[in-house]
Image (spheres, rainbow, N blue to C red):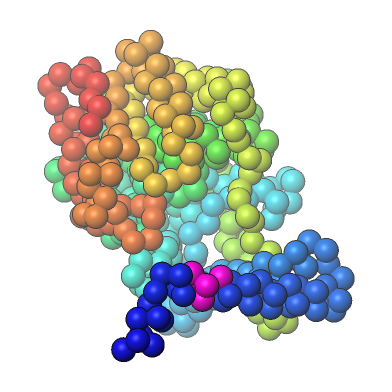
């Protein structure tokens, strides 16, 4: 009993912890030196643990990608016309390539992993997540532009924002694309939205990363969409767009298999795009965001539609100060241009964290998508549509 008392004595516990940490530090130092002597890499020899992580991450990412490609290959053997969801990355394409804004059309698209089951959907004639055949009419109650929240990351069709609107007997042309930002959203509106008719365009702004996305997008061909005259004529080149994207993705699957056979892996990005801080956000990126918002407003005015904006924040995502600045800039634009908005604040979303969010952040779970969509629908269809709502 005395021995047990000595063991749990606070002083003894502190000494034990200190000695344990000291031993771990010594072992770490020895392994780092040994790693350096073998590999002669000063950066990685800072820590053998860091080196191990650098070795492991691409393999973990590769396993996820391999599972998706394995699923695709299996489905293809069963006769399915299937492709992975793809967000255009200029570095993997020839400079003369088209800038693709959607998935492969008329295909089964493998979107993302949710609870170890890949979410799938059939893309429409343009490659977006819409029912086949609906673009023939070209007249819709609503048009959506935005990122993965709008596309409906990791949930079935019925739980997406567009799915909930359709359940309430509204027609929707959904141009949401996972990973996209403001310039990408503008581009989809220019290339495809102007070919449709609607009275309501809803632009979904995700403050968690839209400004970061914009910082990367403006260095690409997307930056030219600020010019009033620029277009890739993707609508008139639908067949070319489809064939080029199919060839690229088929080749990517083959290249992945080659890397896998050679035990070679692409190093993952630590973060995407140039980093952003508050100073650059205020002086460079937020003014550009407002300029894009004005361009989107001008386009919607051009086909006599009402622009509405949904602002989605995230209580556990990236820089809260930049989220706040992004939200304030969009609301400032909205008030100046008589555009109605609804904002889901961090406080509101934090209060509903457990019930609304997927374990795999940052997206909502099926219940969360449906509840948020119902609030948006009620706001968008209310008689006094000029009301601005902050939840």
Q: What percent of the width, then of the height, locates residue 368?
A: 24, 51
Q: Which residue is painted at 38% across and 60% down in the image?
A: 360
The answer to whether residue 196 of the structure is visible from this angle is: no
In the current view of this chain or complex, which residue is farthest to the front? Answer: 2
The residue stretch that appears in magenta = 14-18
Task: Give the quarter of the image for residue 154.
Answer: bottom left
The answer to whether residue 92 of the structure is visible from this angle is: yes
Question: Quadrant where the C terminus lies?
Answer: top left
In the current view of this chain or complex, which residue is farthest to the top? Answer: 336
Q: Is residue 34 above or below residue 362?
A: below
The residue lying toward the viewer, choosing from 40 and 26, is 26
The residue lying toward the viewer, choosing from 15 and 301, is 15
Q: Which residue is painted at 36% across and 52% down in the image?
A: 363
Q: What percent of the width, then of the height, locates residue 178?
A: 45, 50
Question: Quadrant where the N terminus lies?
Answer: bottom left
The residue lying toward the viewer, choosing from 359 and 168, is 359
Q: Which residue is painted at 49% across and 32% down in the image?
A: 322
Residue 168 covered by magenta stretch: no
Q: Is residue 148 above or below residue 259?
A: above
Q: How many numbered discs, if any?
A: 0
Q: Is residue 76 left or right of residue 54?
A: left
The residue lying toward the viewer, choosing from 272 and 27, is 27
Q: What percent of the width, then of the height, locates residue 127?
A: 45, 52
Task: Give the quarter of the image for residue 132.
Answer: bottom left
Q: What percent of the width, then of the height, locates residue 169?
A: 15, 43
Q: Main secondary structure of the magenta part?
A: helix
Q: Which residue is painted at 74% across and 46% down in the image?
A: 95
Task: Give the quarter of the image for residue 367.
Answer: bottom left
Q: Is residue 349 above or below residue 389?
A: below
């Amino acid at each position: 009993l005395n021995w047990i008392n000595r063991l749990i004595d606070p002083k003894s516990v502190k000494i034990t912890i200190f000695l344990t940490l000291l031993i771990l530090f010594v072992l770490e130092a020895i392994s780092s030196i040994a790693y350096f002597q073998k590999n002669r890499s000063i950066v990685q020899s800072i820590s053998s643990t860091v080196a191990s992580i650098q070795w492991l991450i691409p393999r973990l990412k590769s396993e996820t990608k391999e599972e998706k490609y394995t699923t695709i290959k299996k489905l293809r053997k069963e006769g399915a016309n299937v492709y992975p969801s793809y967000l255009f990355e200029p570095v993997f394409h020839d400079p003369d390539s088209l800038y693709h804004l959607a998935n492969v059309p008329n295909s089964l698209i493998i979107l993302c992993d949710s609870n170890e089951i890949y979410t799938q959907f059939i893309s429409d004639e343009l490659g977006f997540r819409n029912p086949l055949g609906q673009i023939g009419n070209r007249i819709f109650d609503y048009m959506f532009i935005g990122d993965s929240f709008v596309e409906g990351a990791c949930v079935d069709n019925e739980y997406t924002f567009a799915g909930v609107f359709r359940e309430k007997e509204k027609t929707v042309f959904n141009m949401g694309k996972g990973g996209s930002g403001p310039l990408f959203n503008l581009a989809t509106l220019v290339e495809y939205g102007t070919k449709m008719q609607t009275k309501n365009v809803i632009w979904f702004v995700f403050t968690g990363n839209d400004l970061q996305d914009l910082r990367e997008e403006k260095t690409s061909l997307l930056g030219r969409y600020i010019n009033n005259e620029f277009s890739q004529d993707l609508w008139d080149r639908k067949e070319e767009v489809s064939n080029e994207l199919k060839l690229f993705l088929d080749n990517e699957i083959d290249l992945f298999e080659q890397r896998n056979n050679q035990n070679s892996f692409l190093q993952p990005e630590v973060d995407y795009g140039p980093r952003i801080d508050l100073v650059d956000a205020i002086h460079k990126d937020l003014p550009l965001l407002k300029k894009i918002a004005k361009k989107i407003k001008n386009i919607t005015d051009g086909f006599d539609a009402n622009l509405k904006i949904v602002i989605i924040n995230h209580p556990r995502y990236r820089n809260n100060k930049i989220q706040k600045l992004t939200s304030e800039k969009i609301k400032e634009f909205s008030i100046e241009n008589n555009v109605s908005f609804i904002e889901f604040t961090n406080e509101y979303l934090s209060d509903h964290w457990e019930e609304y969010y997927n374990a795999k952040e940052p997206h909502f779970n099926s219940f969360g998508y449906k509840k948020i969509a119902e609030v948006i629908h009620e706001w968008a269809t209310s008689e006094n549509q000029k009301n601005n709502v902050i939840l």
